[in-house]
Amino acid sequence: MLRKLTVLLILTAVVLGGIVPAMAQDDEFIFGVILVGPKDDHGWSQAHYEAGLYVEENVPGAKMIVLESLNSADRPETTLDSAVQDMVDQGAQLILTTSADFEVDTTVVADLYPDVTFINASGDDAAWEGAPANLGNFMGQMEYGKMIAGCAAALKTQTGQIGYIGPLIDPETTRLVNSVYLGAQYCYENYRGMDPAELQFSVTWIGFWFNIPGVTLDPTEVANAFLDDGADVLISGIDTTEAIVVANQRAAEGDDVWAVSYDYKDGCAEAPDICLGVPYFNWGPAYLETVQAVMDGTWAPGWAWNAPDWSDINNPDTTAVGYEYGNGLTDEEKATLDEFIAGLAAGAQGEEGGLNLWTGPLSFQDGSVFLEDGQVASEKQIWYQAANADEAATSDEITPPQLFEGIVGTSE
């Protein structure tokens, strides 16, 4: 996320293995996709991989090459530079690095390969001066999907306790936790008629985007701990499916528990009957637009924060973020979520009477004020979760993000 974001992965140089080979032909456009996890993780990495397939299906001559699981557990001796070099040798003209953990290294390798276009998904280096001219960033506005997830959890909970399994702590993940909390509080009060101060919303960070034995907390143990402590809804913020798997196991034992999946459109598939839905990324349109622009010679560097298609947030050809309902929702709950989504849509498009949850008063855990009463957050303030974001000349000057007051869990 931030330019000086500490990279969690420790990457050292050696030979690259596991890239799906592709030889460049005169009529082919080769693009590379570097994944932090496996392409079939039912989460973040699979969503990116399927976006590459979407490009291949829709752009004649487009051919994807893929490196899976570039992380310290699966490929401790592989560097981003060696991965990029291998892809360039195979003819890649565009390379997409699909994790915030690759952000700093992507900026470095972009300088080394000036004739190749680089996109880092979820970073923001291209928004600041000094970024390489061949570097761009894009990200989906998952904040809305997470607000819907929070609303679904608030509509369902009977214990008034919601547990959120978080990855590592950075501006993106903090922003998304805060988004869930805003949606949950709003719906608990306005649709359930309950006191939002009595809603217990807790987050436990495992330390990375998925489980690395001996390095992270075990998300299965975290999920069970939440349920043992009284939570009856689990919300996943990690790239894998432990939240819904554990909730399904506990439901099979007779517990009334539910889960919200994450990242991937079919995230409810492992346990549809206890799933309250899945906020998911739809990377296909952004991939397609980028590939076509690079092929046409019209691509220009920049940072894009892509919104849902509010006319149909689940349109695979137009939306950047969607929300698929799970079977765990009743028809009444689905109707309420429809109303909530319509309010978000109206607010996002500036319509009178629309709902904008990024409106003060909002304070952080340390008591500092994020937004004064009635103040509406700017795009930068939302992105960085910092009151001073609009005044900062560099990303280093922005106040480190925090969770909102009322959330149980650490901000650092």
Image: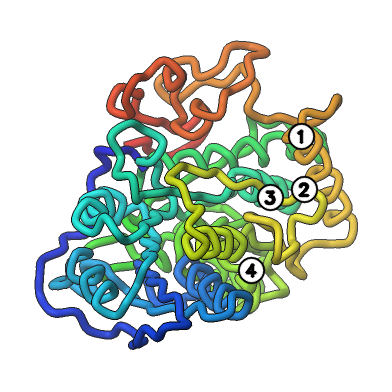
Secondary structure beneath dot 1 equals loop
The location of residue 121, given as percent across then percent down, is: 43, 54
Q: Of 368 and 251, which appears nearest the observer?
A: 368
Report how far apart the C-alphas of labels 4 and 2 lie in the structure.
17 Å
Determine whether 326 is above or below 346 in the image. Answer: below
Secondary structure beneath dot 2 equals loop
- Residue where numbered disc 4 is placed: 265
Determine whether 184 is above or below 105 in the image. Answer: above
Report how far apart the C-alphas of labels 3 and 4 lie in the structure.
14 Å
Secondary structure beneath dot 4 equals loop
In the rendered image, the residue lying farthest to the top is 373
Q: Are marks 3 and 2 in contact (CB under 8 Å)?
A: yes
Q: Is residue 346 left or right of residue 291?
A: right
The location of residue 317, given as percent across then percent down, is: 70, 64
Determine whether 168 is above or below 219 in the image. Answer: above
Foreground mark, 3 or 4, reads: 3
Q: Amino acid at mark 4?
A: Lys
Q: Amino acid at mark 3?
A: Pro
Q: Is residue 129 left or right of residue 318?
A: left
- Residue where numbered disc 3 is placed: 308
Residue occupying the point 86% across, 44% down: 339
Q: Are marks 3 and 1 in contact (CB under 8 Å)?
A: no
Can the viewer see residue 177?
Answer: yes
Sequence-wise, the earlier of marks 3 and 1 is 3
Q: Are marks 4 and 2 in contact (CB under 8 Å)?
A: no
Task: Report crowding for label 1: few under 14, some 14 to 19, many 20 or more residues within 10 A (C-alpha).
Answer: few
